[in-house]
Amino acid sequence: MQAELIAVGSELLWYGRPDRNGDWLAEQLLRAGVPLRGRHLVEDDPDAIGAVVREALGRGGLVIVSGGLGPTEDDRTREGLARALEVELERDRAMLRELRGRFAAKGWRFSETHARMAERPAGAGWLDNPIGGAPGIVWRDRRRWLVALPGVPAELQAMYTAHVAPALGEAAGPQVLLRRRFRMAGLSESVVDSRLQELSLPSDVGVTVLAGAGLVDVLLLVREGEPARARQRLAALGEKLAAAFGEHLYGVDEETLARAVGRLLSERSWRLATAESCTGGLLGAVLTEVPGASRWYRGGWVLYADELKERLAGVDANLLREAGAVSAPVAECLACEARARLEADVGVGITGIAGPTGGSPAKPVGLVYVAVADAAGIETHEHRFSGDRAAVRERAVHAALDGLRRRMQRSP
């Protein structure tokens, strides 16, 4: 059996609201061993809902619709389901009585608007909502299973757990899906993909490459009859990737670059200080998102003005005039002074041109220098990033974290 998710709501389609219900349902399906074939967003329009549901049902399997079952005028999922199934929408008197009783028991006012929640496509059944008002709708034949759940997350999760998960376990059969995310830094998406091709991974392993802001993730998905066997296969695949990508592989699953850096600092009992120009404190923000960062992050400066680079970080005025604020020597000075003045074991300095203006032929937008200073010396890298201002800043932070990580890995 395969599944498709359909999230109903114009706010999801047009106004950028994330489909958190879809994310949660996708995770539950993965745990149940049910492959997810597709996810769809559709506006609050019965014709649009009906068309998407009809197409999904035509492919067979499980279709879960979330949202649009409430009492208001823009809750149009019921009508859409009826159109997809090509049946009439009928009002269930027994459900109407139940809703009236439920509202009365809770002291809620029941109106004709609420009565819409007692409507369902002819031939469909009900799914009880243990914590809310709107019931769910279920319809099934020999090869298709349609479930509609309210969009309120707590209600959707309770109803899925109570009604869908038990039946799904029986329908899915003895199948386990497990995934693992392998996280890379310092390689382009094309290089990662090329190395994966050289590994000749088994054809039954799902492989997805995700790239963004200088980082690349490789997602592997395996399907087995037993959890132990699936875990063994993922472990073996992980060893192959570790051998192929070496120090570029910085973490697995939820391990971020900042977490990897924090772990290495903790292992060495080192403390970190930062001095940022073009990233404007973004590096410090990313570091302090890690729980327990206070154990290894001393703090940092955000030094935009040259005057502050001189006064707070001790950057020589002659150096600023001769080399320019965006230069390797200034990045090195920032790293060294952050380390010394903030009493840390290692310092990071970042300076660059984030854009969209301020560049020149000699120093274009996207030019960034990152320096790492510790007791053994200074390591500096020049980067030329593409993208808009936000992308340059984010890539600079990732480059700084990765440079720091690699230097610590090479340290005795």
Image (spheres, rainbow, N blue to C red):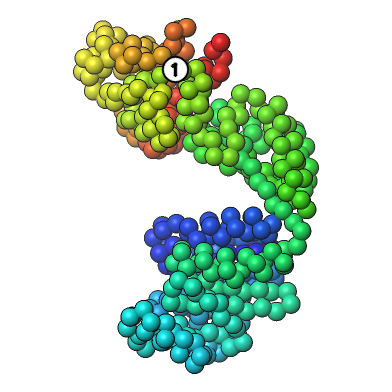
In the image, 358: left or right of 246?
left
Residue 8 visible, this orientation: no
Q: Is residue 106 above or below residue 329?
A: below
Provide the residue designation for mark 1: 270
Residue at left 55%, top 63%?
40
Residue 331 location (% of width, % of height)? 37, 16
In the image, 95: left or right of 235?
left
Q: Quadrant of the C terminus?
A: top right
Q: Amino acid at mark 1?
A: Trp
Residue at left 54%, top 12%?
411
Q: Is residue 350 above or below residue 345?
A: below
Mark 1 burial class by Cα count in 10 Å: few <14, some 14-19, many 20+: some
Q: Is residue 120 above or below residue 248?
A: below
In the image, 221: left or right of 373?
right
- Front residue of this view, candidates 240 and 50: 240
Residue 26 location (% of width, % of height)? 58, 57
In the image, 301: left or right of 200?
left
Residue 124 location (% of width, % of height)? 60, 83
**Which secondary structure, mark 1?**
loop
Residue at left 54%, top 35%?
255
